[in-house]
Image: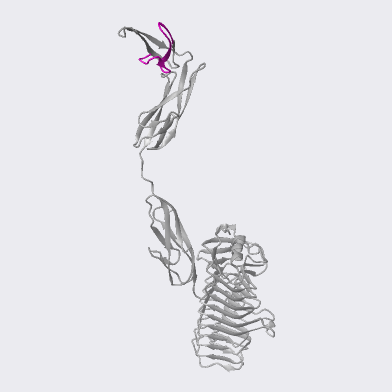
Amino acid sequence: MNSIPNGNATVGTITGSGNSVTYTAPKNVGNFVLAATSVSDPTKSDSAQVIVTPTTPITSVVVSPSTWSLNAGSQKQFATTVSGTGSYDSAVTWSAQRGTITATGLYSAPATSGTDVVTVKSVQDPTKSATATVTVIGSDPVVPTVTAVAISPASWSMSGGTQKQFTATVTGTGAFSSSVVWSAQHGSIDSSGLYTAPASGSDTVTAMSVGDTSKSATSAILIQSGCAPAPTASTVVNVRDSAYGAKGDGTTDDTAAIQKAVNAVSGTGGTVLIPDGTYMINAVKQNSSGIRLGSNMTLSLSAGAVLKAIPNSAGTYAIVAISFASKVNVVGGTLLGDRSAHSGTSGEWGMGLSINNSDQVVIQGVTAKECWGDGFYITDLCSNVTLCNVTADHNRRQGLSVTSVNGLVVKNSVFKNTQGTAPECGIDVEPNGGQTCNNIHISECIFSGNAGGGIQQGASEADMSYTFATNTIIENNEVFGNGGSSYKDGGIAFSCCDSNIIRNNYIHDNLDNGIKTYGQATKLTITGNRVMNNKGDGMLLTGCSGAVVTDNTVTGNAGTGIYHDASSGTYAPNTVNSNGQ
């Protein structure tokens, strides 16, 4: 058959011998030639054409997928479905114009781009077939991709104005760029990663990929400067870390998240870092306070971090409280009270920061404003407390109240716009019954716009027999635009105190007296002050036996330049002129 002795499965087979044989048709249809040749004379032969037709026809062949795109040199598995009637054969053959394909339909694309055609044919009926069009994509180079940026160190504590070298590592695929752009929120950093810290507070250094600006890394920086000592441990915990989960979005109550971070650091000498954002604080959550700090730790707020009291109706609260603790630092940020949204009408003890029964506490660079009571409050047997570079603004009762302390330094700070409920002073040193305030130093501060007065010291006259303030120095401050309320304390007012000094201050343009004493302000030294243009007396001095009032310039005041009663003391020399009386 078809020149194949005895044929085969493709063309059919011949069985038998002699002059009579049997032909068995193949499964596939087609035209075949059956030839017979004489044994005696091989030159004598004859042939017959055999036409094989299907007994059970194939109706269709389908290939899947019918179209496909793939990269040069890659593979794709094709499948086929053969349909027919009766007991048909579903076997097929595969072929490809450019690529290769196995008997099972696994196609391998050529090495170059272009179009290819895959064909599948029925074995039983080769007239039945299907094709798939293949688009071969050229082999392109790997696209450069930046996967991550890491920064080292990831956190750091350093002194203001000093430098630290940071490094960044960029990872990725392909020919990606390893370059980064450095930036700092408050300090400065050059293109090599050399960072220079600002004077105080906290900062964030960022390394951003040049190749993919959505990829960056940050390092949290704590700046030690001014009055706050450096943490005794390098641990820095960020309240936004997943372990704590603070949001700082101005909506979420972050009290529990921040307290969790504080609890983790308390006692370790480490630092809790609060990055920029507005963190809502339930200021009455824990015994009339929000965040309660422990001993031997630093709470560091970045310049843009705000702890905001969730509005409440309580007469007493504290956004941050330091109670029965020692060696505590609070650095930077803003404590924002609920004054404008407070839902209660009673009480005057809603504080930004409250300190009681604590020792070695430093508050640096913190702003406390809009509180229902005081911006800062120090009470109940505190000792060795320092406030530097703080601001108290538009609090309802006081900028700072001090009722019980031994050792307090307040310097380089601003107390302004206190107004709402008496006494309404910038600083009020007013011991509670049976308590004392000793060894206080207030210097280089500004007091302005406080309705009660700039600085007031002393208990009420009713309590003077058993409560006192001693050894206070007030020097090198500017006190102006204070007074106007019923207290009429004006610039500086002292009572119930002993062995205190007011020197080298500029006290001007207050709405009442410049300096006022009353009620046993004994052994008081007032020297080197400029007291000018106040709307009351320049100095109204009563009850101050043993006073030394010398070398002051008192001019332009609406009332008497210097008035003093018969209390013993030294009241000259002073420069006194151009006053009203």
Residue 72 position, x and y percent, is 37, 37
Residue 370 position, x and y percent, is 58, 67
Q: Nearer the viewer, residue 343 or 125?
A: 125
The vertical placement of 475 against 98, above or below, is below
Q: Nearer the viewer, residue 269 or 350?
A: 269
Residue 365 visible? The answer is yes
Quadrant placement of the N terminus: top left
Residue 332 position, x and y percent, is 52, 69
Q: How is the image coloured?
A: one colour
Q: How many labels, in total? A: 0
Q: Nearer the viewer, residue 569 or 287?
A: 287
Q: Which residues are magenta?
A: 1-22
Q: Quadrant of residue 177?
A: bottom left
In reply to whether residue 486 is colored magenta, the answer given is no
Quadrant placement of the C terminus: bottom right
Name the residue furthest front: 40
Q: Nearer the viewer, residue 34 or 538?
A: 34
The vertical placement of 324 against 5, above or below, is below
In reply to whether residue 18 is colored magenta, the answer given is yes
Residue 453 position, x and y percent, is 57, 77
